Image (spheres, helix red, strand yellow):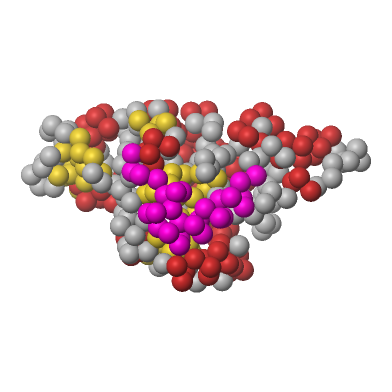
Amino acid sequence: MLLHHLTVPATEFRDGTGWDAKPEGMCKGDVCVPVPGASAADGMLDVGRVADRLGMALEEDPAAGVWALGPESGGHALTTAVAPELELPDVDGNPFRLSAMHGRKVLLVAWASW
Amino acid sequence: MWQALHEEIDPLGATVVTVALDVDPAKARPWIERASPTHPSLVDVEHRVDDLFGISNVPMAVWIDESGTLVRPAEAASIRPSPYAAIEITDRMPARMQQVLAEMRNLPDTGEAYRAAILDWARHGADSRFALAPDAVIAASRPRPIEHSRAAACFELGRHAHERGDDDAAIGWWKRAHALFPENWTYKRQAWTLVSTPEGADSDKAQEVQDVYGTSWSDEFLAVGGAGYTVTPDL
């Protein structure tokens, strides 16, 4: 996830990483991890605190003035079996949300031109 | 290929969703237009499915059930028998080609079994023996040390640099991603193809990028071998 600031709206963080700020902590599917002091009352999130707690790498590109946040680590590639929401465009830019497939089985296949 | 499978499983309540891992969506467009998919066909310039599902090469797939629960982790998603056993290797071929073709015979030939497993799951859902319980899916997904998270962040900074037109910076970030997570072939093949493909040409698969990355696709393929090139489905 690309970041221009290290304090971001919790909703933006959720859409980028699958981790949602809830009263019990940072939650993804059925997994919640307490991260004291991460959430502010105005809905903003301290990315550094969350990254430390969840093992998310935070790399800075000072020349470009941006950071990138890696996924949670320290366990397996899947933290939970609950599929995260994922919104991606089709080749014409029309957005599609994976949750639109609820009620059907989905074979999600990654391919590439290369 | 995926369109034909989609047509077969669609009446059984299952859908193919394809995701193209291409930092330049225009590269994916001709393939998508030729396939004329009736299933969702998406483009993932950030390789987000690597982070979210553990995709590390293509083709790979995950299975998601009707309730939105993963029932199989990221694994090789060939659905045809390997063509490599049938290719005759002769002395007239360049030595490197002989080596690569010989090693390709060691790629897991799981296409037919994987295709049969998909059809079984499409028909029987949770009763299919190929649909795993949540704990088993998590345990069967690959371990993720902090280096893999750093690699993902470096790959994304490289993509951002590429998008800005700063390919020198992109190459620097991508080299770091490759060193941190060498088993992720989506980071490597994506970066290499941008260097080795001539302007306006179809994507180059040989990826001879010694000048820039000090390596090539065949060097690295031969180093890991066919058995180490992807995540073999445990069916």
Instruction: Name the quarter where the N terminus of chain A is drawn.
Output: top left
Q: Quadrant of residue B2?
A: bottom right
Above/below status of A92 relative to B56: below
| Residue numbers of the magenta segment | B109-135
What residue is drawn where x is 79% and y is 48%? B86
Residue B219 visible in image: no
For this orientation, the residue located farthest to the right is: B92
Classify residue A20 as left or right of residue A72: left
Find residue B37 and report its horizontal and vertical position in percent: 53, 69
Give yes or no for residue B155 being in the magenta stretch: no
Find residue A52 and report its horizontal and vertical position in percent: 26, 29
For the image, the number of numbered tags is: 0
Q: Nearer the viewer, residue A82 or A10?
A: A82
What residue is drawn where x is 60% and y is 37%? B229
Q: Nearer the viewer, residue B38 or A87?
A: B38
Task: Give the dominant element type of the magenta stretch: helix, strand or loop.
Answer: helix
Above/below status of A75 relative to B197: above
Classify residue A63 as left or right of residue B36: left
Above/below status of A24 relative to A14: above
Residue B200 visible in image: yes
Find residue B104 and report its horizontal and vertical position in percent: 71, 40
What residue is drawn where x is 91% and y is 41%? B92
Find residue B189 and report its horizontal and vertical position in percent: 59, 42
What residue is drawn where x is 43% and y is 53%? B128
